[in-house]
Image (cartoon, rainbow, N blue to C red):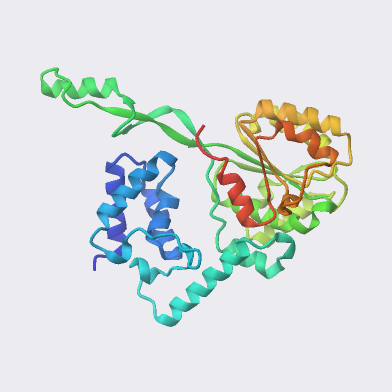
Amino acid sequence: MSDPVELATRFCRVLRAEGLAVGTGQIIDFCRAAAELGELYWAGLATLVSDREEIAVYDRVFRAFFSGHESMSMPEPQPDAPAVMRTAHTAGLADPSDEDADQQVAMASHVELLRKKSFADCTEDELHALFAAGARLPVATRRSRRYRAARKGSPDFQRTLRASFRTGAEPVRRAWRVRRLRPRRVVLLLDVSGSMAAYSRALLFFAHAGVRAQRGWEVFCFGTRLTRVTRELAQGTPDEALRRAADEVVDWDGGTRIGESLKRFLDGYGHGGLARGAWVVVCSDGLEFGDPEMLGQQMLRLSRLAHRVVWLNPLKEDPAYEPLVRGMQAALPHIDVFSSGHNLAGLVEGLAGALGPR
C-alpha cells in the first residue's frame, strides 16, 4: 500500500486542480485530522472544504480518487456508528492492534456523548476531556476583494488576454476566477453572572479553544461590568488561561447588566473596529437586572454595526422554554440567530448554521 501521507498529498493536489483552495496548511491539517479521527472522508470534508458549493466537487473527486480502495469509499451515515468512532485502521492510515482500536472507539464514543451532555452536568474532568479532544470549531469567512484562479466562476479577462498571445491573439483558452475567502472576526460576549455559573467555566473553555485555534477571535466577559480577556485566553493550558481570566474579571458570579455592558463594548471597542462587520456571539440567559429599554437600544446599535448577531441561551435546552423575561424580549428583534448553548454540540451547531461567506 502507498505511503498514507503521499496518498493524502496526491488527493489534495487533485482537489487543487479542480479549483479548491487547498494549500500546504490545509494538507497538514487534513493529515492530522485523518490520523486523529480515523475517517478519511470526514477529515477531508472538515479541513479541505471551505464553501458549501465545493462539497459536490469534493464528493466527486473523493469517489474517483479512492474508487480502487473499498475501505476508503464514502461512508453512509449510521446512527449507531458515528463517523468519529471509526478507527484509523478503517481509513487505511494506520494499522493498530485490535486492542488499540477498541480503545480509540471507546474514547471517541465517550467524547461524542460528552458533546451532547449539558455543561451544567459535566464534571471538571469531563470538561477537560471534552475540550482536549478538540472543539472542531466552525470557521467564519468572508469574500474578499481579491480573486484567485479557478475552473469556474466569473471570466478573468486579463489572464485570458495574456494566454491568447500564445495562440495568435485568439482566446482559445478562457480563464476564470472567484473571490478569495478571508477569515471574519468573531467576538464572544460571555455572561459570567451568578445565573450562568453552571455554564461560565465551560464557555471560557470554548473561548480558549477558539482563540488558540483561529485568528480574529475576541472574548469579553460581562456581569455588572465588561472585561476583555482575549490576551489571558490566548496562551497556556485551559486551566492557566481561566485562572488569568478570573483574576481580571472582578464581577464573577455577580449580577447581570447586559445593556450597560453592551454599551461599554460598543463605546469602547465596537465602533473602533471590533464589531464592525464581525460575527458577535452573546452567550447569556438574558436575565437582565438593568433597564430592558437600554438593552434593546444597545442591541439595535449592535445589529447595525455587526455582520450578524448570534445569541446562545442555555435555557433554550428545555423544549418548553419561551423567551418571556424582559431582557430577552428586548433583545430578540435584533438577533439574527437564536440558539441553545447548553452543550458543545449546541454551541458548534448554533455557530455552524450561521458562519460562512456572505
Whether residue 234 is visible to the viewer of this picture, yes or no, is no
Residue 142 percent location from the top left of the image:
50, 33
Lateral position of residue 253 relative to residue 299, left or right = right
Identified at 26% across, 63% down, the residue is 69
Residue 357 percent location from the top left of the image:
50, 35
Lateral position of residue 217 relative to residue 175, left or right = right
**Relative to 86, residue 66 above or below:** above
Residue 86 percent location from the top left of the image:
44, 68
Identified at 36% across, 49% down, the residue is 24
Quarter residue 5 falls in: bottom left
As drawn, which residue projects farthest toward the front?
Answer: 320
Lateral position of residue 251 relative to residue 69, left or right = right
Identified at 68% across, 49% down, the residue is 340
Quarter residue 140 falls in: top right
**Relative to 76, residue 221 above or below:** above
Quarter that holds the N terminus: bottom left
Residue 249 percent location from the top left of the image:
79, 49
**Relative to 246, residue 326 above or below:** above
